[in-house]
Amino acid sequence: MIKKYLDEVNAILAKLLELTIKDIENIKVAKHETVATSVEEKNKLVAEFTVAKKQLDGALVELNNSSVKGLSALLDDEDKQKLDLLKYNLQELHSKNKEYAKFVLIVKNFLDGLVNTMFATNDGINNAYGDIKTNPDSIFKINV
């Protein structure tokens, strides 16, 4: 049963990694129309991961409580390899998410600078028309 849960968790993480890598490539070429779909897919995968991880945790706790030997003595080499893969996938996902967040921050800062150039941020006067009061926050929103 533990093998099944480990396979499931690792498969979900592999999909999350794949999506994150695609997101990084898309943001590099300013292909931002895919963001909403990707975020939706990632949210579903995170929900699936949460459920699968709880099942894995439950199975590991049950196995550990069934013996006094300790968990490492109860797991075979294949289980240990899959746990190592889980650890690697989590670290890799963390690294890729940090990389993606840096790109998102760069784009956000660019857009903020653009808004600040277009609009006087102190008094809300539209630089192009001079007499129309505009709130820059009402024009652009970013979801990170």
Image (cartoon, helix red, strand yellow):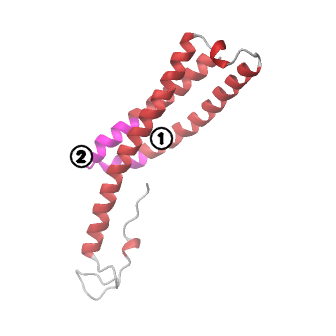
Q: Report which quarter residue 26 is drawn in.
A: top left
Asked if the stretch drawn in magenta spans residue 25, the answer is yes
Amino acid at circle 1: Lys
Towards the viewer: 139 or 89: 89
Q: Is residue 114 above or below residue 9?
A: below
Residue 125 shown left or right of residue 91 in the figure: left
Q: Name which residue lies at 45% across and 46% down.
A: 39
Q: Measure how far apart labels 2 and 1 are at the Cα level.
A: 20 Å
| Image coordinates for residue 70, horizontal then vertical, percent | 69, 18
Q: Which mark is residue 32?
A: none
Towards the viewer: 116 or 37: 116
Q: Name which residue lies at 35% across and 55% down.
A: 105
| Image coordinates for residue 88, horizontal then vertical, percent | 45, 27
Other-residue count near label 1 (Cα within 10 Å), few / some / many at <14 / 14–19 / ≥20: some
Asked if the stretch drawn in magenta spans residue 30, the answer is yes
Q: Report which quarter residue 52 is drawn in.
A: top right
| Proximity of marks 2 and 1: CB atoms separated by less than 8 Å | no
Q: Which residues are magenta?
A: 19-37
Towards the viewer: 90 or 45: 90
Q: Secondary structure at mark 1?
A: helix
Residue holding disc 1: 42
Q: Which mark is residue 29?
A: 2
Residue situated furthest front in the rendering: 69
Q: Is residue 126 above or below residue 99?
A: below
Residue 8 shown left or right of residue 110 in the figure: right
Sequence-first tag of 2 and 1: 2
Amino acid at circle 2: Val
Q: Is residue 124 above or below residue 73?
A: below
